[in-house]
Image: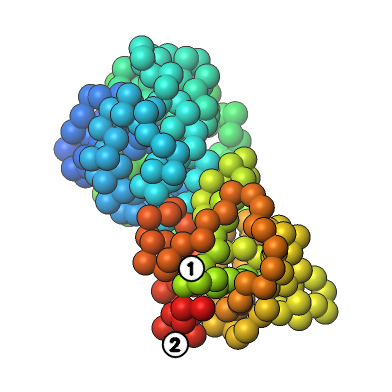
């Protein structure tokens, strides 16, 4: 027989057990040891699209470098991107840098937080609930999965309405649901016997846990072949800065671009460097191929050692010694390329 659920039932039998479970079982994470809304905001921005274990070392280093919103606002974007290097989704770092100038006073409402660059409904609700106790539900992938199973529904409107109607102790309830999704109600093989909601979970009671939420068929990611040039001139290599408003915006990389159909990589590298940077190069030798996956596509970077021939480079470019490249924020694929180059192939001073 289906239990008739009232709000009181849901709060007593679901919300309070989740909050108690979270207070007892929660992982000791650095952003849970602070009430400073700036530090909570930094953690929530880092945790967008990123696993806790990946974000952890970045969080400590970032806050050691930029301990306050004012320090972050005063920093150069290059330094912020360098501190973010390897974490991906660099628009987060650029937006956080811009937002830092608008955190005095720190916005305490969901609407106020949403006016900050890069802060969407998820991050605004997370920061408002955790830092200020605002009753704003957070809906990320983990929460969606947990509540979809709890209610045995795929309907996002019902999931949101249930959360909005029942939220209590908002900071701990939101974090409790997220942590349950991460550690107990996992996408595969959830550990229902350990779950504080198992007595009220409809999917568990009906033995249909694996039906919720329904899985979307993922399409294969498109793949691009890219030709890159490591262009040498007088012991230095050429790097260029990407435009700030696009993918990997503001990061430094070796020049190059997508290969056209039937074009050789050598021709691609010469053409791309001429078009993008305005210089002529002689392609000398293949030095490495690096495969990298982004969220929406995959690339294979085919890197070639080149010699500068003629022209004045245009755009935001630098001639840098290899040992100086550590100072520049570079995309992971360019870093992997540097690491994979055989010293004999690239370390020649020309
Ligand atoms: Fe998830 Fe199982 Fe808990 Fe239901 S009982 S919320 S399926 S872990």
- Label 2 Cα crowd, 10 Å radius (few <14 / some 14-19 / many 20+): few
Picture residue at 58% right of the left edge, 42% below the top: 244
Quick check: is the Cβ at mark 2 less than 8 Å away from ligand 1? no
Q: Secondary structure at mark 2?
A: helix
Residue under numbered circle 1: 236
Give the Cα distance between marks 2 and 1: 15 Å
Residue 141 visible in the current orientation: no
Expressed as whole percent of the image width and height from the top left, the position of residue 145 reads: 48, 44
Picture residue at 44% right of the left edge, 44% below the top: 78
Q: How is the image coloured?
A: rainbow
Picture residue at 43% right of the left edge, 54% below the top: 328
- Label 1 Cα crowd, 10 Å radius (few <14 / some 14-19 / many 20+): many
Expressed as whole percent of the image width and height from the top left, the position of residue 70 reads: 32, 24
Q: Is residue 341 above or below residue 34?
A: below
- Circle number at residue 280: none
User: Mark 2 vs mark 1: which is more N-terminal?
Assistant: 1
Q: Is residue 12 above or below residue 54?
A: above
Q: Is residue 280 above or below residue 214?
A: below
Between residue 235 and residue 27, name the one nearer to us: 235
Picture residue at 40% right of the left edge, 41% below the top: 80
Residue under numbered circle 2: 344
Q: Secondary structure at mark 1?
A: strand
Q: Is residue 116 above or below residue 341?
A: above
Residue 29 visible in the current orientation: yes
Mark 2 or mark 1, whichever is nearer to me: 1
Furthest residue toward right: 262
- Exactly how many numbered labels are in the figure? 2
Q: Quadrant of the N terminus?
A: top left
Between residue 183 and residue 246, name the one nearer to us: 246
């Amino acid at each position: 027989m289906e239990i008739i659920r009232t709000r009181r039932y849901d709060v007593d039998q679901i919300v309070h057990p989740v909050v108690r479970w979270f207070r007892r079982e929660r992982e000791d994470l650095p952003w849970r040891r602070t009430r400073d809304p700036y530090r909570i905001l930094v953690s929530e921005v880092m945790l967008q699209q990123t696993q806790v274990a990946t974000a952890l070392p970045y969080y400590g280093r970032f806050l050691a470098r930029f301990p306050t919103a004012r320090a972050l606002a005063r920093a150069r974007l290059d330094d912020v991107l360098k501190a973010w290097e390897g974490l991906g989704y660099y628009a987060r770092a650029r937006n956080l840098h811009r937002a830092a100038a608008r955190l005095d006073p720190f916005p305490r409402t969901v609407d106020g937080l949403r006016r900050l660059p890069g802060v969407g409904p998820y991050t605004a609700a997370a920061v408002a609930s955790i830092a200020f106790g605002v009753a704003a539900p957070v809906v990320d992938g983990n929460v969606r999965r947990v509540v979809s199973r709890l209610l045995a529904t795929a309907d996002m409107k019902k999931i949101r309405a249930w959360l909005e109607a029942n939220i209590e102790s908002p900071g701990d309830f939101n974090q409790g649901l997220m942590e349950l999704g991460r550690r107990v109600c996992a996408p595969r093989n959830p550990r229902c016997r350990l779950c504080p909601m198992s007595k009220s979970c409809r999917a568990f009671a009906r033995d249909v846990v694996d039906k919720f939420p329904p899985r979307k068929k993922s399409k294969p990611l498109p793949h691009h072949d890219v030709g890159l040039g490591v262009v040498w001139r007088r012991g230095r290599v050429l790097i260029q800065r990407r435009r700030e408003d696009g993918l990997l915006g503001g990061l430094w990389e070796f020049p190059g671009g997508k290969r056209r159909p039937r074009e050789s990589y050598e021709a691609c590298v010469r053409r791309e460097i001429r078009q993008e940077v305005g210089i002529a190069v002689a392609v000398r030798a293949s030095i490495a191929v690096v495969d990298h996956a982004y969220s929406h596509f995959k690339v294979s970077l085919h890197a070639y050692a080149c010699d500068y021939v003629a022209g004045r480079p245009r755009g935001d470019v630098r001639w840098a010694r290899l040992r100086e490249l550590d100072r520049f924020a570079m995309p992971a694929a360019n870093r992997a390329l540097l690491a994979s180059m055989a010293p004999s192939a690239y370390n020649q001073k020309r």
